[in-house]
Image (cartoon, helix red, strand yellow):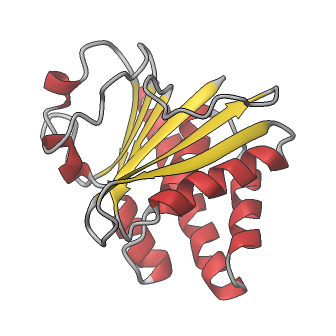
């Protein structure tokens, strides 16, 4: 089973990201389960959502404590809570930030090697949507970095979820993020 934990703040589309990822996984013929975990249910409050991906039916219902992938929609959370708790060795980390790994002090937070993508998801969302909602952007990055779900499945899930104009902006943003991460990976190869 492949497990994803998404950290962000209320209003950033954390729960929608988990749901879109689950729909994209279904499009690819696999099983998926998405669910949120709320504390204070207000804009700006920390929010966590989860998505499990499997070739088989998923029976587990508990929160994901040892994710294969962390998606961090708001880098300020890195200094506030232990978003890296339980991350599997050699897992994937996707961070929405304009800062570098050094500036984010990730070497102090992540003790074993991980596959890392840092991208300005909020800025990409502003360019394509005119709104600071990084969720679809980060799903494009997820597709590029993990290869667990193809970009086409992500864009189809977005198209099914949103009205045409909003869907088009989100598809363009996810595609831009996919290309950004593919270029980042090619540069470091």
The answer to whether residue 73 is seen in the rendering is no
Name the residue rendered at 25%, 22% in the picture.
110
**Left or right of 90 in this view: 153:** right
- Name the residue at 54% across, 57% down: 17
- Report the side of 40 relative to 188 (left or right): left
Residue 43 location, x and y as percent? Answer: 30, 72
Residue 154 in view in this figure: yes
Q: Tell me which residue sits at (77%, 62%) in the image.
A: 156
Query: Which quadrant of the figure has residue 66?
Result: top left
Quadrant of the image occupied by residue 136 = bottom right
Q: Is residue 175 above or below residue 123?
A: above
Looking at the image, the residue that sits furthest to the right is: 29
Residue 90: image quadrant is top left
Is residue 36 found left or right of 100 in the rendered image? right
User: What is the number of callouts on the image?
Assistant: 0
Task: Name the residue nearer the viewer: 168 or 54.
Answer: 54
> Taking 73 as reference, is 162 above or below it?
below
Q: Quadrant of the N terminus?
A: top right
Could you say which is closer to the camera, residue 58 or residue 134?
Answer: 58
Q: Horizontally, is 170 left or right of 57 in the view?
A: left
Residue beneath the point at 24% across and 54% down: 98
- Residue 70: percent from the left, percent from the top? 42, 36
Give residue 172's position: percent from left, percent from top. Answer: 60, 69
């Amino acid at each position: 089973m492949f497990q994803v934990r998404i950290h962000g703040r209320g209003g950033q589309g954390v729960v929608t990201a988990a749901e879109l990822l689950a729909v994209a996984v279904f499009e690819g013929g696999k099983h998926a389960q998405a669910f949120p975990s709320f504390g204070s249910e207000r804009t700006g409050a920390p929010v966590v959502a989860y998505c499990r991906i499997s070739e088989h039916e998923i029976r587990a219902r508990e929160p994901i404590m040892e994710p294969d992938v962390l998606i961090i929609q708001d880098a300020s959370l890195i200094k506030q809570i232990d978003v890296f708790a339980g991350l599997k060795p050699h897992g994937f980390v996707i961070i929405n930030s304009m800062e570098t790994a050094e500036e984010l002090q990730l070497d102090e937070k992540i003790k074993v090697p991980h596959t890392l993508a840092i991208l300005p998801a909020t800025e990409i969302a502003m360019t394509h949507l005119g709104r600071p909602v990084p969720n679809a952007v980060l799903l494009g990055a997820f597709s590029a970095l993990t290869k667990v779900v193809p970009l086409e499945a992500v864009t189809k899930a977005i198209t099914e979820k949103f009205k045409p104009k909003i869907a088009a902006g989100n598809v363009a943003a996810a595609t831009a993020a996919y290309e950004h991460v593919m270029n980042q990976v090619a540069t470091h190869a």
